[in-house]
Image (cartoon, grey):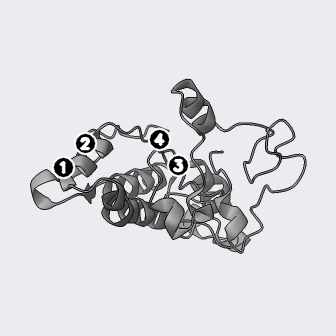
C-alpha cells in the first residue's frame, strides 16, 4: 500500500502502473497501489515535503541530490524473503534495508560532506515501516508455501516478529556516530 512505483522496475505481476490505479493522482498511474496518494504521500504533504520518489526510479545522479526522502516500498514484499515470490520479483525487506544502508553510506555523504551532518540528517528523519499482511495473504495462507502447514498461527507470528526485529537493527554512520534503529519492545502476539 505504500509502493510509489518501485515494482514498475521489476519483473513481477504485482504492478499498478495501469488504470484504474492512479485515476485520482495528479500524475496518473505511477505504480501506486491506490487510486490516488499513498499514506506516505499524505505524510509528506502534511510536512510540506515532495512525495518521496521510488528508489528504483532514481539514477545515481538523482540519488546524490535526494535529501527529502526516498520510498523503498515494494508491493507484494513481506517480512520473510520468500513471501509472494510466486508472483515475481519484489524488493524484499532485506533488500529494502540494504538500499537504505546504501543511501546512508554512499548517497548522503555526497550531499552532507561530514559524517556528523549525515547523522544529524538521519536523526531528524521520519521512517515508516509496515509489513506483515503479505506474509499472511501471500505466504502463510497460500497454497504456494508450506508455512501454513509448518507453523501454528502463534509460532508464525513470532517468526515474523523476530525476523522484523532483527532486520530493523540497522547500523548507519561511522562507529563513533552510529545510530541504531531497532525495535526495543516487541509485544507478544496474541491470536
Point 44% across, 54% down: residue: 160
Q: Distance of mark 2 from mark 3, alpha carbons?
A: 27 Å
Q: Distance of mark 3 from mark 1, alpha carbons?
A: 31 Å
Q: 32 or 113, which lies in front?
A: 113
Q: Which residue is mark 4?
A: 128
Q: Which residue is mark 3?
A: 131
Residue 97 in the image: x percent, y percent? Answer: 41, 61
Q: Closer to the observer: label 2 or label 3?
A: 2
Q: Distance of mark 4 from mark 1, alpha carbons?
A: 23 Å
Point 60% across, 41% down: residue: 51
Q: Is residue 119 visible?
A: yes
Horizontal relation, residue 187 to residue 67: left or right = left
Residue extending furthest right? Answer: 19
Horizontal relation, residue 8 to residue 72: left or right = right
Q: Looking at the image, tell me whether mark 2 or mark 3 is earlier in sequence order.
A: 2
Q: Distance of mark 2 from mark 4, alpha carbons?
A: 18 Å
Q: Which residue is mark 2?
A: 120
Point 38% across, 66% down: residue: 102
Question: Considering the numbered disc 3 on the image, is that residue within a helix, a strand or a loop?
Answer: loop
> Count of labels shown?
4
User: Which quadrant of the figure has residue 43?
Assistant: top right
Q: Which residue is mark 1?
A: 116
Q: Looking at the image, tell me whether mark 4 or mark 1 is earlier in sequence order.
A: 1
Residue extending furthest top? Answer: 46
Question: Considering the numbered disc 2 on the image, is that residue within a helix, a strand or a loop?
Answer: helix
Amino acid at each position: 500500500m505504500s509502493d510509489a512505483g518501485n515494482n514498475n522496475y521489476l519483473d513481477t505481476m504485482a504492478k499498478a502502473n495501469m488504470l484504474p490505479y492512479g485515476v485520482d493522482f495528479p500524475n496518473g498511474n505511477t505504480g501506486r497501489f491506490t487510486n490516488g496518494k499513498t499514506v506516505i504521500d499524505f505524510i509528506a504533504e502534511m510536512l510540506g515535503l515532495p512525495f518521496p520518489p521510488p528508489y528504483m526510479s532514481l539514477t545515481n545522479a538523482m540519488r546524490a541530490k535526494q535529501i527529502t526522502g526516498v520510498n523503498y516500498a515494494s508491493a507484494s514484499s513481506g517480512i520473510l524473503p520468500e513471501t509472494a515470490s510466486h508472483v515475481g520479483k519484489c524488493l524484499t525487506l532485506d533488500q529494502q534495508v540494504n538500499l537504505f544502508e546504501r543511501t546512508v553510506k554512499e548517497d548522503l555523504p555526497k550531499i552532507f560532506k561530514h559524517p556528523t551532518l549525515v547523522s544529524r540528517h538521519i536523526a531528524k528523519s521520519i521512517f515508516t515501516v509496515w509489513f506483515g499482511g503479505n506474509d499472511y495473504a501471500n505466504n502463510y495462507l497460500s497454497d504456494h508455501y508450506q508455512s501454513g502447514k509448518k507453523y501454528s498461527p502463534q509460532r508464525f507470528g513470532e517468526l515474523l516478529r523476530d525476523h522484523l526485529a532483527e532486520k530493523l537493527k540497522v547500523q548507519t554512520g561511522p562507529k563513533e556516530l552510529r545510530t541504531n534503529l531497532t525495535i526495543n519492545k516487541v509485544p507478544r502476539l496474541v491470536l
